[in-house]
Image (cartoon, coloured by chain):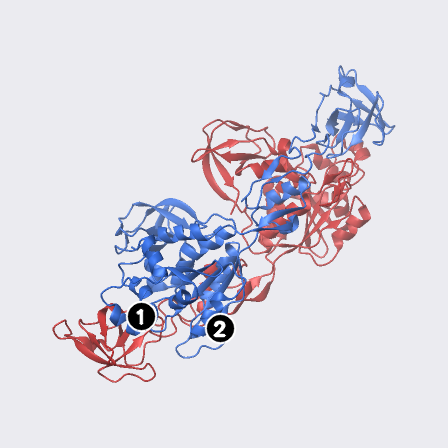
Chain colours: A red, B blue
Amino acid sequence: MISRAGARQLSTGSCLRQGRTVQRACVYRGTAEATAEMTGTMRSGVNEVTEWIEQHVRRLDSERVPLADAAGRVAAAAVAAVVRVPPADRAAADGVALRADETIGASGYNPLELRLVSSGAPPARGSAVIIAAGDRLPAGTDAVAALDQVQIGVDGRCEIAEPVGSGNLVERAGTHVEAGAPLVGSGQRLDAYAIGALAASGVDALRVVRRPLVRLVLTGRALAEPGRPLAAGGVYDADGALLEALIARDGGQAGPARWTAGDRAALAAALVDDGADIVLVVGGTGPGADDASAATLASVGELAIHGVAVRQCETAGVGVVPPATSVFLLPGAPAACLWAYELFAGCAVRRAGGRPAALPFRARPMALDRKLVSAIGMVDICPVVCRAEGRIEPITPFAEAGLAAALRADGIVIVPEGSEGYARDSEVLVYLFGE
Amino acid sequence: MISRAGARQLSTGSCLRQGRTVQRACVYRGTAEATAEMTGTMRSGVNEVTEWIEQHVRRLDSERVPLADAAGRVAAAAVAAVVRVPPADRAAADGVALRADETIGASGYNPLELRLVSSGAPPARGSAVIIAAGDRLPAGTDAVAALDQVQIGVDGRCEIAEPVGSGNLVERAGTHVEAGAPLVGSGQRLDAYAIGALAASGVDALRVVRRPLVRLVLTGRALAEPGRPLAAGGVYDADGALLEALIARDGGQAGPARWTAGDRAALAAALVDDGADIVLVVGGTGPGADDASAATLASVGELAIHGVAVRQCETAGVGVVPPATSVFLLPGAPAACLWAYELFAGCAVRRAGGRPAALPFRARPMALDRKLVSAIGMVDICPVVCRAEGRIEPITPFAEAGLAAALRADGIVIVPEGSEGYARDSEVLVYLFGE
């Protein structure tokens, strides 16, 4: 595993070569430093990448949006109630608003008769007002008799046959929320309930964290776009569609994907183009002759880390292009691309958008129905399906089933570098997919 | 509780009156039948409403969308892979493609030397091809030697110092997915992983369930729109914003809200207007003089159920307007509106859109940190917050805190009609908010 200091050296071009670098340079016609990391002894750990993200990716600035557009967004600052809720004392149910003290002594033998008046003016003593749930309590009244407590005659009068306590069926002003009371905190995700509570208290617009704009750069030469026929040796691009959906899930917005088709000049141009908050370069991350992504990033910006100790995405990398845009290098194989996104690029998208950087999955301890085998030396991401309550079973791994494993799985187990896996019936932490 | 047969009678106008109907009719100047249900003995149970929804709300028809627009949608039919993945045998890593049988006997003392040729033509015996991960395996070769298994010279030759097994580092055609293999099932929600897997197998468009178009009809007279000043006695409308966010959460789309401001003709017109899949009428559901929603629905369509045995939303109702559009009557008080949506209208929105009708919350047994008291006779929805691991505490109920209780709570406990609540340390099922 490479230290952060080591990674910085790499990124600034200092020489960190290993035994076979000379042979490799013949294949990998780019930065020999980046190649060196591919030897297996120099991969960075997951924590180093996530620490790099913490240092380099900040929550974005905010924008003001109407409340109607704020659902699902992240509040950029605390928001307080504009008005109290309820704004005034009001009836909690349909009924008759009256003065409670007038009803003392009322009974079936001695009913109190009140004159029904319109709700315009404050009712005089000896009168009452028909009131609907939610109506403001008329001045002078202090209680509501429910409809089943009162006999309403056809002569403009009503009868009360029991005493009504002061405040009966009255919602007091401000009992739900006082004006100025905090409703949502900075960084809080705005769900429907928050939107409703903000609307009730008179908030009609608020500042939310800007959605990160993410540029996708697809470097593959043999990628077929959706709907086009597949040439011999070509593959349909899965990464573009996959990443667009992942970015949307994480609160970002993907700009139109750039297809550079293995052209290094086009890749360099796409890297330094304006406007994006985060750039994802897909493909060309390996040590092969055609793998130009790391070298190109190093030439137009800074390559901070290349090579991570995760079996599913060991050629992933991170860096920066001017002015200070984070760039993530994602392997082109779709399952590798997926995990380089979920573990690294996705953290940056979520963090920039004000969401928690962690995997957006629910983690739950569950027991293994079969043993789970993992080779020591790298973090291993193992797809599993749920069996009986609280139990899981490993399925064909990403190396053999590709992206289809993610589709079939209910979740994953992340086996640390130093572990060879777990015995049957072990309790392991499962990250369950889905919302 | 009213039987389904009773509900049908009500909806067709048969007479089911109770003791105080004559007095009530004076206040509730609409269908006396609907009023009768408000007496408390005739409310429908939650199950009757959900059964009504099962009978009256069907999954909508489908529409074809590009894969790029399909994330979050529900597949209307099973989708199979168009092409196999990988489409051909390919290299699983960067390296050298060769004939495995030629490497038998290779060792450090007796290295095998191979001539490196370009990847255009099938390599002759005694030669090999430098290959990148994901490249199609050249005809005639059957294995890939990884870069750390091979010494690549500057003279157009390479040396192999160990045998390479046939199929080494080769991904066989179709091992991830065979052409025609089912990828997603009918009714499956399309997450990012499904989108990626579909793209990889050549699917560029598919049929998804149409999103239900939901019309909101806000009947309140004293509602202030967001951003307008609050008149005396007025309140800011929370229900419109709340419902729009809930409908979007559940996969529907809310059309522009209609504000009828207590005008019955406008309400009748809004009910029979064209185009919506589901109509939500907000407010005017009670037995008061101004409550016209149930009567208006009965006059222009069919009122099937009015009044439900749920304390938080007892004046909710359901019915139909021609041609066969489901109409939900939601109380105007925001917390009541919320629960009438979550328990009833939301089921219809989710079901019409092809999602599970159940509450979109995670249910988990947890222990009560304090006793939870509920009056017998109606279902009671009690907001709770999570305390120590696996424990919850009831908070100020919706009746006292309104929508703010939903904002403060982490979830709810639903206490059945026949229960007076639960003792401290009881284990209860908690519906946890959030995705």
- Kind of residue at disc 2: Glu
Q: Residues within 10 Å of mark 1 (few under 14, many from 20)?
A: many
Residue B230 percent coordinates (x, y): 45, 77
Residue B337: x percent and y percent? 41, 62
Instruction: Please give left or right for residue A194 compared with residue B44 in the image.
Output: right
Q: Amino acid at mark 1?
A: Asp
Give the percent coordinates (x, y) of residue B311. 32, 59
At which x and y percent is residue A131? 32, 75
Chain letter of the residue beneath label 2 in the structure image: B
**In the foreground, B48 or A209:** B48
Mark 1–mark 2 contact, CB under 8 Å? no
| Residue A88 sits above or below residue B5 on the image | below
Residue A28 position by quadrant: top right
Which image quadrant is residue B200 in?
A: top right
Q: Quadrant of residue B122?
A: top right
Element at badge 2?
loop
Q: Where is the N terminus of chain A found, in terms of image quarters?
A: top right
Does A33 sit left or right of B389 as displayed?
right
Residue B163 placement, left or right of A116:
right
Towards the viewer: B130 or A379: B130
Tag 1's secondary structure?
Answer: loop
- Within 10 Å of disc 2 (Cα), the crowding (few <14, some 14-19, many 20+) is some
Residue A415 visible in image: no
Question: For this view, does B175 lie left or right of residue A288?
Answer: left
The residue that appears at 86% across and 28% down in the rendered structure is B156
Spatial CA distance of label 1 from label 2 is 24 Å
Look at the image and tell me whether residue B175 can be seen.
Answer: yes
Task: Report which residue position mark 1 lands on.
Answer: A94
What residue does disc 2 label?
B225
